[in-house]
Amino acid sequence: MNFCVIVKISRHKVSFWYQSGSSPYASLIIKDSNEVPLYFYVNGTDFIFGEDLALNRFNSNDPNAFGNYFEIIKDPGNHFTIGGNKKPVKQLLYHGIEKYLHFFITQVLYKNDSLESYRQHFPLRFWFESDIEDKEKSLIENIFNEAGYHNVERLDYNEFLFQALASASVINPNSSVLLLNGINNTLYIELYNNISSPITQSSKLEGHGADPSVQLLAEMILEDILAQESYLTVNKEAEIAFLLPYSAIHLENITPIIKGDALLTDGEKHYFEVRHRVLNERLLYYSNDIVIYAAINDILSSNNINTENITVLMGSKVINTPFMINKLLAKYPNVKGVDQKYLNDAIKGMFAKVSQAGYQVKKNIQTEVIASVGLPPVVNTPPMVNSPPVVNTPPRVNTPPVVNSPSRVNSPPVVNTPPRVNTPPIVNTPPRVNSPPIVKIPPPPPPPPPIKKK
């Protein structure tokens, strides 16, 4: 199989990309976007994943609708019913992702085959965001392994991002890197000793996962909506976190009056107006950057790293803003925003790695060799994997006489057999054509004529 699907998973949404053959990678979109919120609605045999209906049903407290996926899976007693079959809620995400894989096979590859026929060898790769814990990553991988997906692997996106930045000389490959990401209004801080090392230390700050101007605008948008529609009952923290990406887009093109229709978690759009002058006035009183400085300094001091020897990278869009960069530059000399180009190059690098590996996971290549050849794993001997005589003819591989014996022409059973040409009954018998008794005997003489008497 010369294709691959990468699934990016965070606590509140999943995203899909694919690459097939020599074509460049692309977003896998069923409806509107390749980003899908983690809401599910199950009714009979209907399974709805990420659509407005699922969100609306969840907000209406429908017992067949599910959200907060990574919270509800902590209770093994939580179940859902599909097609009359009761299943644990952890399989909701499995069914949701499979819906996209089925779409990919039928609508992108234009195959009429069933998904079941692809499961074992389907090149599926997971990219986990910083807000997913290690035990949650293992849980998701195990769900797919148990369902028959054996060509599954976890990819480290940051590894490919660092390679793209180092190749463009944005960062020094041998220097320490402090990567900042804002996810759902939580700031994740991750220290790497160099671009090839794993995470050395990490920290997170809830409520600080966005540029203050982005967060303040989100708060002001919600305030204006509630002022107009006072009957709305909302969870302010959840709504502000939900509005952050939308707020960041509006700040890319500043106008005196920022207005539009903002989508809230109820699935409905609500009109708002915010004056840019008021936003700037509120920013003058912003002081939460002190909390971020303290968190960064704690990590640097505990690892004996001087601020001169660290590059601070602004990874996500909601914190990669001039306001946030300038705030950090006041304390740290090397602060750099990550352009969208390098984010795209990192995804391209992930697909390139999968392609170079033949769209297979190394451990599975090794397993196939063991199963078909019957020998210990030889990781560094690719010819054994690709050699048809070995893979397709197990008897000859496993039979020492065939592998170690000389050519069949000199086989002892043939050499030692006495030649038939020397067999006396056949070779030494005189030819029958020369036998006198049979060939040369003349016919008997005719009888003499009778003697007449005179």
Image: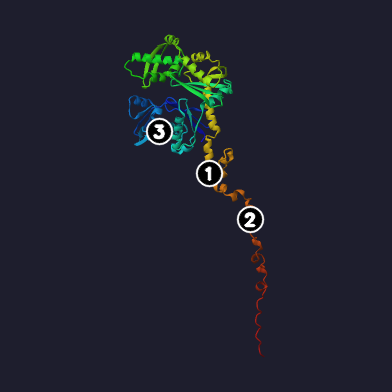
Q: Amino acid at mark 3?
A: Gln
Return the residue nearer the eye: 251 or 444.
251
On the image, the x and y values in percent for residue 117 come to 45, 39
Name the residue type under label 1. Ser
> What residue did someone put label 1 on?
372
> Which amino acid, by three-letter code, is at mark 2?
Pro
- Which label is found at residue 32? none
Earlier sequence position, callout 3 versus callout 1: 3
Q: Could you tell whether 267 is left or right of 213 in the image? A: left
Q: Quadrant of residue 277?
A: top left
Mark 3 surroundings: few (<14), some (14-19) or many (≥20) residues within 10 A: some
- Mark pair 2, 3: CA separation: 63 Å
Residue farthest toward the left in the current orientation of the protein: 231
Q: Are marks 2 and 3 in contact (CB under 8 Å)?
A: no
Q: Indicate left or right for 275 with 193 as reference.
A: left
First in sequence: mark 1 or mark 2? 1
- Dot 1 falls on a residue whose secondary structure is helix
The correct choice, above or below, for 126 with respect to 240 in the image is below
Q: Which residue is mark 3?
A: 91
Mark 2 — residue?
412
Q: Position of residue 61 (x, y in %)?
A: 33, 26
- Label tally: 3
> 10 Å neighbourhood of mark 1: few (<14), some, or many (≥20)?
some
Does residue 189 appear in this view?
yes
* Percent x, y of residue 109: 47, 33
